[in-house]
Image (cartoon, helix red, strand yellow):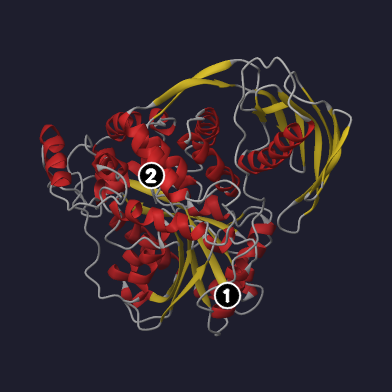
Amino acid sequence: MGRRLALACCVPLALAFLTGTSSAASTLGTPCGSTPGLTCLEVDVPLDRTGVVPGTVALHAEVLPPAGISRGVMFLIAGGPGQGSAHVFHLGSPSQAALMRFLFPGYTLVAYDDRGTGSSGLIDCPTLQGAITADAQRDAAAQCATIIGPGRVFYGTADHAEDLDAVRQALGADKVALFGVSYGTKLSLAYALAHPDHVERMVLDSVLPPAGPDPYSADVLRQMPATLAAYCSNGSCAVATRDLAGDVATVANRLAAKPLQGQVLLANGRTASERLEGLTFLSIVLDADLNPGEAAELPAVVHAARLGNTQPLLRLARLHDASSVGAAADLSSGLYAATVCRDGPFPWSPDAPIASRPSIFQSAVGSLPPGSFGPFGNWAARFGNADFCIRWPSPSGGGTLGAGPLPNVPVLALSGGFDMRTPTQNAVSVVSQFPQGQLLVVPGVGHSVTTADPSACAAQAVRAWILGGTAPSSCPRPAPIVTTVPALPAPGPASPTQPRSPLATYAIAAETVREAEAAWLMSAPASVPGIYGGKFLSGQRAITLQRYSIAHGVQVSGTLRLTKTDLPLTFTGTVTVGGPGASAGILGLSGTSLRGTLGGQLVGR
């Protein structure tokens, strides 16, 4: 979470399918995907369960039986809201199916697309899908409400929970286990409140409590400095900054007071205007918990901005913008809006006129005690869904979940120590409500910890817990995928008249290589511009630099190949260093060793 998000054609499924017996599998549903045994189904549900508004939604569901006798049924529930679970978990891929079978041995796996996502009546609002800034998102959300029409009221979490139960009934299962990730944890808990007698157990990864999210994301903002400090507590950020949390707060408040605007280089050699204000900057910081490459860039880039070198931050914002816009089939921003704007909570009543809400919002924010947003000013209140939904037609907010009580069932909650959007405190508060609850924390890992943990400690713990063992309370901090980018060099004069010394050139070249590795991890295969010139071509196992520059006048060219996948990743290659501000030469890279000759002098280690 975080701002930025009836079998109509088939024979009804019998319990024999769920127990893994071979007699039913060939007669039920439609075989689909590349995974043997996977069946695709449609479950028709009413748009409006009160019957006042006609219409139905066909929920796309995928069911994969275990290899042997089933120990039960496990629903896989993705996040957002806006991600279709069948689309995200992709059980039709043998490798994805193998991972889920590893995590949940003996379970029949079920993934269905929520209404409004994936193949279940996808909501697609193109303007909202491409909106980046808070102002653009707020305006586009209001437009999206018009596109969806009056039916938008039927996309709250309570509606999703009843859809889950409809799929359960179609499968003929009495009790089901739930694996929820991010918003999927809220939906899992909402289902447990509405149908406690049908829940066997739950695995909750990156926990969002049922009453969340906070309308202003105040809880996220208050805990962000501590989460950043914990991320740096092993000394990994020291090569770039002594105070990442302080850097983030300082830069955010500056940008809120005076947005940054400038030209950034594009991969085609042209430039484009980039504008960065406080709320978008907070989104960049937040998204580092989903992108290890961005996390490796963040300390150096933000510290440089604090010292006045803002060009790296503008370039990072441009890369972030490019990665933030995706297809609705992957994550529907329209469904996100329909769900969070129906759920709330907001400071206004659900039927409050839109014209009255800004003053209600400002009054509510003004009445909050000092420190409600941590080190950030009251401007940061707009980071939450209240501002995003302020123009959403009534009813806006007021969504209610089942009355409960929560079932007394085994619960395993997982949290990443670097998860900023669903901080560990969320998981602590939820686990405390379950007598059979356990919490596993993985330091240094961000959001969606089960699959984000490169050490696989979290995945092994889930499997052991499913098989009846006890999960540990914590995992060792895994090694990073790439090392933190060192402090960025001063840019130097735009048109240097003489080269830097061999040692000064070497320092910049070494920093350029490490920065390129992080930017490679951050970006999908693409052409990625340098900060001050050139670009690199990003491949799956190689980085081809073409006069790539992070300081004026120093250009690095060559190919770095991924040679070892032990963490941190190891690259090997040869690069040529040149440019009017450099002592020219050639360097060879092998892991942490970079050495060669610059300006006729041996350099490196």
- Say whether residue 183 is left or right of residue 316: left
Residue at x 41%, y 58% (from the top left corner): 226
Residue type (three-letter) at the residue carrying disc 2: Ala
Nearest-to-viewer mark from 2 and 1: 2
Residue at x 38%, y 41% (from the top left corner): 250
- On the image, the x and y values in percent for residue 122 come to 43, 41
- On the image, the x and y values in percent for residue 221 come to 34, 51
- On the image, the x and y values in percent for residue 74 come to 50, 69
Above or below, 457 relative to 83: below
Q: How many marks?
A: 2
Comparing 508 with 538, the one in front is: 508
Location of residue 521 (image quadrant) = top right
Above or below, 20 relative to 161: below
Query: Does residue 535 appear anywhere in the picture?
Result: yes
Query: Does residue 65 appear anywhere in the picture?
Result: no
Q: Give SS at disc 1.
A: helix
Q: Earlier in the sequence, mark 2 or mark 1?
A: 2
The residue indicated by pointer 1 is 461
Comparing 221 with 406, the one in front is: 221
| Mark carried by residue 249 | 2
Residue type (three-letter) at the residue carrying disc 1: Ala
Location of residue 259 (image quadrant) = top left
Circle 1 Cα neighbour tier, 10 Å, few/some/many (<14 / 14–19 / ≥20):
many
Q: Kindly report the distance in space between the C-alpha atoms of the residues bearing marks 2 and 1.
A: 35 Å
Comparing 420 with 222, the one in front is: 222
| Mark carried by residue 50 | none
- Say whether residue 253 is left or right of residue 368: right
- Say whether residue 414 is left or right of residue 559: left
Above or below, 217 relative to 414: above
- On the image, the x and y values in percent for residue 60 come to 48, 52
Q: Give SS at disc 2.
A: helix
Location of residue 50 (image quadrant) = bottom left
